[in-house]
């Protein structure tokens, strides 16, 4: 597998010298936000991670290689190229073999992070069980990846366009700890609340690092969800955003949108229906997750050394 991996000099130096590294995905750049907000967000998130003592490793697939860390020109490519494919576990061999450019989802980024020895990953929100998933069986591969891949995922909960209750039930079944970072309630991406609880509340990076280390030392494979609510100043009202999501879901059903096209459509439609407020919230929560992830990576590194 190593022949498919390539790192930037910054990331290679950090990994070789056992420094804390935080993985970042590219789907949020290519399919989650419009240009130029996507490239501005990507650069700012990398800066935040560096400012908090860790090294950012934005992950994507280009020219038959899994790139652990991207140059500024490569980031720009992911932000502007309309032909970038969305890559999850099943898509890895095809995208690599064909030499196409692929943006990694949560699942794919977790795989690449584990292959390169990175234990902490910052994203926006994880995928999950879609609403009416009991009918469509539309369940994100992010959940099965969390059940088997040893990476802690710092996120603002699951995307609120999903069925959060069933998503949490799935995670419980597969033994994935859902940690509320300074909260006892599972955040719902755009909002700080959801009506659902978390498994454990932890209030410091050191506590999270100790839990990660204990889990993996016991040989309990799989990731952890570190649910970090969007800052209060940037959060949307839970009831209001729920009404908007219901409208967007109805429109997606009318248009016959399914599979991997559902999430990009819904996020874009929610942005339109909230007059851009949801995009501002999305950017704010990603930045906050990057900060917390960097602190956890530093704490985990200190514990292991």
Image: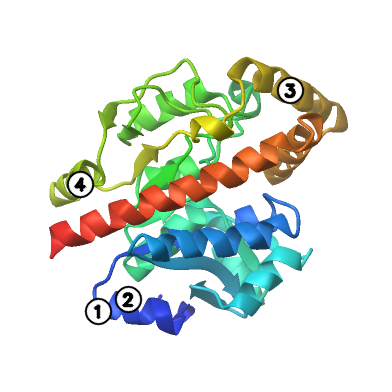
Give the residue at x 49% y 26%.
Answer: 192
- At mark 3, the secondary structure is helix
Quadrant of the rendered image containing residue 302: bottom left
| Mark toward the viewer: 4 or 3 | 4
Question: How far is disc 1 from disc 4 in space, using C-alphas?
Answer: 21 Å
Give me the disc on residue 175: none
- Residue bearing the label numbered 1: 17
Lower position in the chain sequence, tag 4 or tag 2: 2
Q: Residues within 10 Å of mark 2 (few under 14, many from 20)?
A: some
Is 131 on the left-hand or right-hand side of 84? left
Question: Decide: marks 4, 2 in contact (CB < 8 A)?
Answer: no
Question: How far is disc 2 from disc 3 in space, using C-alphas?
Answer: 43 Å
Give the residue at x 66% y 42%.
Answer: 280
| Mark toward the viewer: 1 or 4 | 4
- Residue bearing the label numbered 3: 244
Question: Decide: marks 2, 1 in contact (CB < 8 A)?
Answer: yes
Instruction: Note whether residue 150 is visible.
Output: no
Give the residue at x 29% y 51%.
Answer: 296
Q: Residues within 10 Å of mark 4 (few under 14, many from 20)?
A: some
- Residue bearing the label numbered 4: 206
Q: Residue 88 in the image: x percent, y percent? A: 56, 54
- Residue bearing the label numbered 2: 14
Question: Decide: marks 2, 3 in contact (CB < 8 A)?
Answer: no
Query: Compared to 134, does 69 lie above or below?
Result: below
Q: Residue 68 in the image: x percent, y percent? A: 46, 72
Question: How far is disc 4 from disc 3 in space, using C-alphas?
Answer: 38 Å
- At mark 4, the secondary structure is helix
Could you say which is closer to the camera, residue 261 or residue 281?
A: 281
- At mark 2, the secondary structure is helix
């Amino acid at each position: 597998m190593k022949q498919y991996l390539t790192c930037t000099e910054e990331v290679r130096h950090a990994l070789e010298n056992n420094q804390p590294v935080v993985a970042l995905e590219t789907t949020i750049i290519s399919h989650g936000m419009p240009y130029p907000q996507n490239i501005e967000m990507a650069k700012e998130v990398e800066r935040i991670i560096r400012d908090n003592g860790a090294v950012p490793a934005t992950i994507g697939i280009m020219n038959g290689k899994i790139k652990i860390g991207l140059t500024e020109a490569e980031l720009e490519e992911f932000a502007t190229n309309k032909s970038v494919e969305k890559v999850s576990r099943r898509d890895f061999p095809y995208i690599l073999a064909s030499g196409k450019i692929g943006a990694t989802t949560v699942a794919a980024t977790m795989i690449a992070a584990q292959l390169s020895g990175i234990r902490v990953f910052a994203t926006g929100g994880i995928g999950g069980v879609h609403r009416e998933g009991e009918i469509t069986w539309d369940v994100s591969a992010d959940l099965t990846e969390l059940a088997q891949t040893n990476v802690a995922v710092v996120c603002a909960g699951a995307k609120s366009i999903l069925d959060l209750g069933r998503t949490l039930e799935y995670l419980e079944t597969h033994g994935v700890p859902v940690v509320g970072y300074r909260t006892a309630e599972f955040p719902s991406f755009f909002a700080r609340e959801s009506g659902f609880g978390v498994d454990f509340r932890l209030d410091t990076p050191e506590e999270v690092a100790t839990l990660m280390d204990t889990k993996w030392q016991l040989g309990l494979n799989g990731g952890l969800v570190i649910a970090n609510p969007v800052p209060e100043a940037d959060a949307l009202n839970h009831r209001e955003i729920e009404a908007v999501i219901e409208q967007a879901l109805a429109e997606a059903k009318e248009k016959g949108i399914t599979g991997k096209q559902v999430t990009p459509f819904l996020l874009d439609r929610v942005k339109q229906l909230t007059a851009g407020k949801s995009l501002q919230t999305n950017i704010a929560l990603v930045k906050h997750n990057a900060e917390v992830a960097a602190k956890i990576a530093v704490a985990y590194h200190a514990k292991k050394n």
